[in-house]
Image: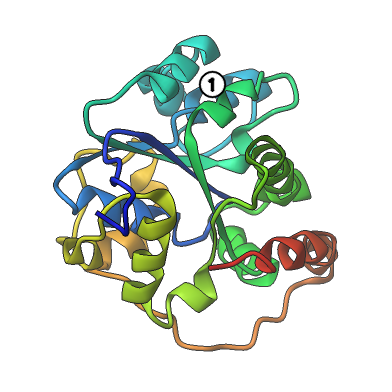
Amino acid sequence: MTGNIAQNIAQNIAMWSGPRNISTAMMYAFAARGDCQVWDEPFYAWYLKITGLDHPLRGKIIAAGITNADEIITLCTEPRSKLHYQKHMTQHMLKNLDRSWITDVNNAFLIRSPEQVLASYNQKRQQVSLADIGYAQQLEIFNQVADHTGTAPPVIDSDKFLQDPQTGLQNLCTVLNIPFSKSMLSWPAGPKSYDGIWAKHWYNAAHQSTGFASPAPKQIILPEGLQKIADQARPIYEKLRQFAL
């Protein structure tokens, strides 16, 4: 119990993040609870099939995933007997997708400075646009949820969170109305059974981790083209950061 409010551990939680954040580590933290099922990027296969984008392992991702959006939405929103954590990428929420289902789940948002996102993304995929890193989509979803609930949903700024992960997780669990567990602070190294098939390309650092670790500070100097994208994304990041826990 928290105060007089019963905590609800039978719910769908959607965590909305762009790429190259601590989204995989956050998924690992929820999986480590022991009372939580996790789902890694439910819409990725659908997104690749619809857009035709040439991402690493594209064919295998489409073959292994669900490419019917209605089926994915049903699975994201169906009633649960336990906690169900969904790691969503905001860039997967295309304009032609019905987003009304989003207000049927409990939502939280994970943000990171665009300079850090782009520096990391560019190491894995050379072609990148503002749409690829999901900032505009993230703000749209945030506004949708806030308009529906009448209050700002929880936002986690990864830089601030990594300074004190335990407090950050405690605050997040309080807002989500679920009990905090210290088991969320660590997990075994290596690939996980619930990783998406794309993990072999994207999750190198996550597979080496056994908990949240703050990266060593370093100066980021982006090429002109990437800096222009960062400049476009920064006002959105700053707006969302106002609501960070």
Q: Who's the residue at 50% across and 31% down the image?
A: 44
Q: Residues within 10 Å of mark 1 (few under 14, many from 20)?
A: some
Q: Quadrant of the N terminus?
A: bottom left
| Residue type beneath disc 1 | Trp
Q: What colour scheme governs how the chains and residues are painted in the rendered image of this protein?
A: rainbow
Is 141 situated left or right of 168 in this image? right
Per the image, the residue denoted by label 1 is 46
Establish if 123 lies above or below 66. below
**Which of the 4 quarters of the picture holds residue 119?**
bottom right
Measured as percent of width and height from the top left, residue 73 is found at 49, 18
Q: Who's the residue at 48% across and 32% down the image?
A: 105
- Along the line of sight, the residue nearer the viewer: 65 or 5: 5
Measured as percent of width and height from the top left, residue 156 is found at 52, 63
**Which of the 4 quarters of the picture holds residue 83?**
top left
- Along the line of sight, the residue nearer the viewer: 203 or 39: 39
Establish if 238 lies above or below 216. above
Measured as percent of width and height from the top left, residue 244 is found at 59, 67
Q: Who's the residue at 66% across and 81% down the image?
A: 220
- Along the line of sight, the residue nearer the viewer: 70 or 81: 81
Measured as percent of width and height from the top left, residue 133 is found at 66, 50
Establish if 26 lies above or below 92. below
Query: For numbered disc 1, what is the local secondary structure?
Result: helix
Q: Who's the residue at 69% across and 28% down the image?
A: 94
